[in-house]
Image (spheres, rainbow, N blue to C red):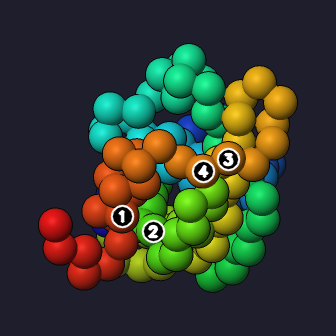
């Protein structure tokens, strides 16, 4: 599992100091992007190699609110994979408390025409390392 810390700032909240629902989508995106970057596959590198990932579908369960100045942990792990898609299970936590659970399906697309394409085998194997219980 991959995770990143995120601090809640004023720009993330509504007038009541609670994180605005759309900001959670950005937090989840950062964790997925940083997971790829940690594997050596930054967004620009992927695009230069002719591949982009696009969100196909997303399900989010809002369990508890995050608030101004909270320090959150945003996780990303791979729950299912196909040759041209990945399903991430993601969570946002404040300490041990789960605030949000999400399932995000992303599609592998050719950068030139945004048509589905299989992932590079090396990237595919690296993403498999984010699956629970993965053993090399």
Question: Alpha-carbon distance for marks 2 and 1?
Answer: 7 Å
Point out the tag, 2 or 1, that comes first from the N-terminus: 2
Image quadrant occupied by the C terminus: bottom left
> Mark 4 and mark 1 in contact (Cβ < 8 Å)?
no
Is residue 6 shown left or right of residue 109? left
> Mark 1 and mark 2 in contact (Cβ < 8 Å)?
yes
98 and 103: which is toward the camera: 103
> Mark 3 and mark 4 in contact (Cβ < 8 Å)?
yes
Q: Tell me the tag on residue 128.
A: 1
Is residue 104 shown left or right of residue 2? right
Q: Quadrant of residue 37?
A: top left
- In terms of secondary structure, where does tag 3 sit? loop
Residue 94 visible to the viewer: no
Question: Alpha-carbon distance for marks 1 and 4?
Answer: 14 Å
7 and 131: which is toward the camera: 131
Q: Residue at x 67, y 64 (%)?
A: 105
Question: Alpha-carbon distance for marks 1 and 3?
Answer: 17 Å
Q: Residues within 10 Å of mark 1 (few under 14, many from 20)?
A: many
- In terms of secondary structure, where does tag 1 sit? helix
- In terms of secondary structure, where does tag 2 sit? strand
Image quadrant occupied by the N terminus: bottom left
How far across and how far down the image is residue 19, in percent?
Answer: 67, 55
Point out the tag, 4 or 2, that comes first from the N-terminus: 2
Q: Tell me the tag on residue 118.
A: 4
How far across and how far down the image is residue 102, in percent?
Answer: 62, 72
Question: Alpha-carbon distance for marks 4 and 3?
Answer: 4 Å
* Looking at the image, residue 121 lies above or below residue 80: above
Q: Which residue is mark 3?
A: 117
How far across and how far down the image is residue 132, in percent?
Answer: 32, 78
Q: Which residue is mark 2?
A: 78
């Amino acid at each position: 599992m991959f995770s990143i810390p995120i601090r809640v700032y004023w720009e993330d909240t509504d007038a009541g100091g609670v994180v605005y629902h759309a900001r959670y989508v950005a937090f989840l995106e950062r964790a997925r992007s940083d997971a790829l970057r940690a594997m050596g596959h930054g967004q620009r590198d992927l695009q230069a190699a002719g591949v982009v990932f696009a969100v196909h579908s997303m399900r989010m369960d809002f369990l508890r609110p995050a608030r101004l100045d909270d320090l959150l942990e945003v996780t990303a792990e791979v729950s299912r994979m196909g040759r041209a898609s990945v399903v991430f299970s993601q969570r946002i936590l404040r300490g041990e408390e789960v605030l949000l659970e999400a399932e995000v399906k992303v599609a592998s697309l050719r950068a030139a025409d945004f048509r589905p394409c299989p992932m590079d085998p090396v990237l595919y194997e690296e993403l498999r390392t984010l699956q629970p219980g993965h053993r090399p």
